[in-house]
Structure formats: C-alpha cells, structure tokens
Image: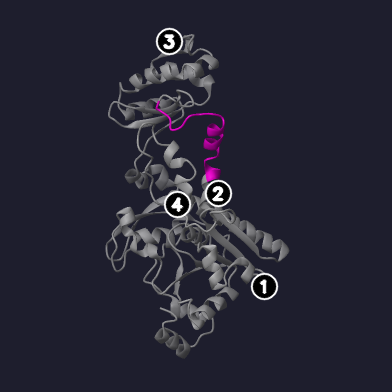
C-alpha cells in the first residue's frame, strides 16, 4: 500500500509550484484531480521555456509537473460549474491551490469560507510573499519572490558579472517538496484529531529558509557577490582542469589537508607556515587558491576525478544538465528516466524527491496529461451526474 493511497486531492492551481506539489502526492498514491478552467492551465502553452516540443499528444514541459493526475475542466463562474467544484470538494481530503487570496475570496474558496462546510478538509496554499504584510497580495513567481527577493540572483553570481541566470522551477519545486511534506503532516494530524487544517508555503518563505546560511553570512559581514578567491576556504572551492571542465573540491575538514597535499603532488604545502595550522590556512586562503588554480590546470578533469576518488577525498565534477539523465548513479536510483510518447516524441522526466519502500520506483505510473478536460465526464459521473445533465453542462459552457 502506498503512503497516500485512498487520499483524494483536488488541485486548483497553475504553472509549477502547485502542480508539482500535486504530482508528488500522486506519486505517493493519492488520487489527484486537477481542476482547470475551460481555457486550461497556462503552463500547457509554455513549452518554449524548456525548449520542449509540443504536439497533439506530447507536452513534456507540462507533463513534468502533471504526471499521474486526472483532468477536470470547469467554468467556475457559472452556477453549475461552481456547484460541480463544491460537490467535488465534498469527496476530497485535500484542496490544493496557488490562486491568490483575493481570487479565492471572490470564489468562496478560502480556508475560512470552506471550513464550516468541510471541517475535515486540508486546505493547502502556495503563496508568493506570505499571508501577511504589505505585499501579501503581490503576484509572486519563482524568479521574483524566490530567486530575486532572497539574494540568490544578486549574491550568488560571480563578482563583477551580471546577476545569476537560473532556470524555471528552482523555487517552485523547492516549495513543492516542502508543501507536500506539510500536507502529509496535516493528514496525520487529522487522523489523530479528526480536524482539517490550513497549510501554506510561500516562495519567499522557502527561499529565505533554503538560503539560511547566506543570510547568516550577510548578517556577519561577508561581502557579496564574491570572487573566486573569496571562498570560505581554499579547499572548498571550484577549480578548472586542463580540459576546461570544472570540479568542486570539498575538503572541508582541515585535518585532511596534509593528506590532500600529498595526493595532488604538493606535499610541501602541509608544512608551510602559511598553511600548517588552521588559523594560518584560513588567513592565507587567497594565496592557496592561486596555487591550486595552477595545479589543477596541469591535468584534465578525468585525471583529477579518478585520483581524488581513489583516496576518498570529497569532490564532485561540475556536471551539465544535458548529462544528468544518463548519469549511472541517477539511473541506478531511478531519479530520472527517458520517456517516449506514442507519437515518437522523446523526453526525460524525473521521479519525486523521496523513495518509500512501499513504492517500487520501477513501477511508478507514467500517466501523461492528455487534452484539457480529458477526464471531465468520468469524474462528473463519479459525483452522481447523469448523461443528460453532463450534456447540458457541456452545451452551456459549464465544463469542457
């Protein structure tokens, strides 16, 4: 039995953070019904964001956030459309949304508006800037509330260059990991109390949390953005090899510094007064960075990777996105996989952020999205609607 088997999630969200949260819950066994407007989730038409193809059958950019769901399309502005949504919520354990609070208020879908009629419902929200404060109603996106507002783009870029360029989903997917766990905790609480719960996670909140050590560094006076030489210490830094590729050296324990010096062919550094104590080592890090820069340029990356691995010295190759799906370690753990649609379109997908013994990664379903409203009729019949009423709702534009 999967952890969330028997749990029904009604998802009213668009773009990335809310949909990815629901996708994680679906992988954990929940029955996820994604409710879209009759125009569909705007992310259906954003394939260019990831350079993905989009055909009548294949939409990998959309499917990455929306695997293993059922799809219901409702016009919530009509009486019958709104009534269908409320009837669906009667059967739900979780209502997940990333609509802004003012939009939910107009629709009668805030936690406070629903808790009387649905006292056991878990109401889960993705917010941009949080529930309180002067900017609580601002539109918040991954790039803005998570990446820009928290210091990530400005302070993690190399000094002297433009702000760091990120990819869509860094903040959204971080929110999804946090919110899916919070929903699971709220469901556990409901089992013990019989009560519903309100759960929310904001992009600004998660960005602030994930960058906690950055905030601590800034508070303590570290200047950002940093140069290559202004690292925490010389053996926790990036170095370029002779072939132009990079590695991250992570000898974070100074006690292993003498061993590292011996392995890379710089034994004299271990006894040099400028580096032979931890105090001196930190004080003279810029000089040591210069020495190591020159040393790593003597051989290509595979040489250094093999040498450091042979001595169990912590480091990692700076991989490229295009290579990650074929990484043997990624494949061995089912973290990502290749997928081919029925029309021959090829893509890569990732599995969720955690593994359960009760879920064999090799058997996780890969149900793709299908067109807008592809499950509308089936879902309405589950709610007790007959064929005549469903046809009428299609004719009146209540559903799609």
As drawn, the label of residue 116 is 1
Quadrant assignment for the N terminus: bottom right
**Number of other residues with Cα within 10 Å of mark 4, as a class: few under 14, some 14 to 19, many 20 or more:** many
As drawn, the label of residue 61 is none
The tag earlier along the polypeptide, 1 or 3, is: 1
Residue 289 is drawn in which quadrant? top left
**Number of other residues with Cα within 10 Å of mark 2, as a class: few under 14, some 14 to 19, many 20 or more:** some
Query: Which residue occupies the foreground of this view, 8 or 215?
Result: 215
- Between the C-alphas of marks 3 and 2, the distance is 47 Å
Q: Position of residue 220 (x, y in %)?
A: 56, 30
State yes or no: discs 2 and 4 in contact (Cβ < 8 Å).
no
Task: Answer whether residue 355 is visible to the viewer in this image.
Answer: no
| Residue 2 is inside the magenta segment | no
- Front disc: 1 or 3: 1
Q: Position of residue 269 (x, y in %)?
A: 44, 12
Query: Which residue occupies the foreground of this view, 366 or 144?
Result: 144
- Between the C-alphas of marks 1 and 4, the distance is 33 Å
Would you name the residue on which mark 4 appears?
142
Q: Position of residue 206 (x, y in %)?
A: 53, 48
Asked which secondary structure carries label 4, the reply is helix
Q: Which residues are magenta?
A: 208-228
283, above or below 357, in the image: above
Would you name the residue on which mark 3 appears?
268
């Amino acid at each position: 039995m999967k952890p969330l088997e028997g749990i029904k999630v009604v998802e009213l969200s668009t773009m990335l953070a809310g949909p990815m949260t629901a996708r994680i819950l679906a992988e954990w066994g929940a029955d996820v019904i994604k409710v879209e407007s009759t125009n569909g989730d705007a992310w259906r038409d954003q394939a260019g964001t990831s350079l993905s193809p989009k055909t009548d059958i294949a939409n990998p950019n959309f499917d990455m956030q929306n695997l293993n769901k059922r799809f219901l399309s409702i016009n919530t502005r009509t009486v019958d459309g709104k009534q269908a949504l409320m009837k669906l919520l009667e059967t739900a354990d979780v209502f997940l949304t990333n609509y802004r609070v003012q939009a939910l208020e107009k629709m009668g879908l805030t936690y406070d508006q629903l808790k009387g009629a649905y006292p056991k419902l878990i109401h889960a929200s993705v917010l941009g800037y949080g529930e309180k404060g002067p900017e609580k109603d601002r539109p918040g996106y991954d790039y803005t509330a998570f990446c820009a507002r928290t210091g990530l783009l400005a302070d993690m870029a190399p000094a002297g260059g433009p702000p760091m360029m990120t990819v869509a989903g860094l903040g959204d997917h971080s929110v999804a990991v946090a919110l899916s766990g919070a929903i699971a905790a709220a469901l556990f609480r409901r089992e013990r109390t019989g009560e519903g719960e309100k759960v929310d996670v904001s992009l600004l909140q998660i960005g602030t949390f994930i960058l906690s050590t950055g905030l601590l560094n800034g508070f303590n006076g570290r200047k950002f953005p940093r140069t290559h030489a202004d690292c925490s210490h010389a053996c926790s830094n990036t170095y370029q090899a002779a072939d132009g590729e990079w590695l991250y050296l992570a000898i974070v324990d100074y006690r292993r510094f003498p061993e590292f010096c011996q392995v890379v062919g710089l034994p004299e550094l271990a006894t040099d007064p400028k580096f032979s104590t931890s105090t001196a080592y930190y004080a003279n890090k810029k000089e040591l960075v210069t020495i190591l820069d020159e040393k790593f340029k003597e051989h290509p990356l595979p040489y250094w990777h093999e040498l450091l691995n042979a001595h169990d010295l912590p480091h990692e190759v700076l991989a490229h996105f295009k290579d990650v799906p074929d990484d043997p370690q990624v494949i061995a753990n089912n973290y990502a996989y290749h997928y081919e649609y029925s029309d021959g379109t090829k893509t890569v997908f990732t599995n969720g952020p955690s593994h359960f013994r009760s879920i064999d990664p090799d058997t996780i379903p890969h149900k793709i999205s299908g067109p807008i409203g592809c499950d509308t009729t089936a879902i309405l019949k589950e709610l007790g609607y007959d064929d005549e009423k469903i046809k009428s709702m299609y004719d009146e534009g209540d559903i799609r």
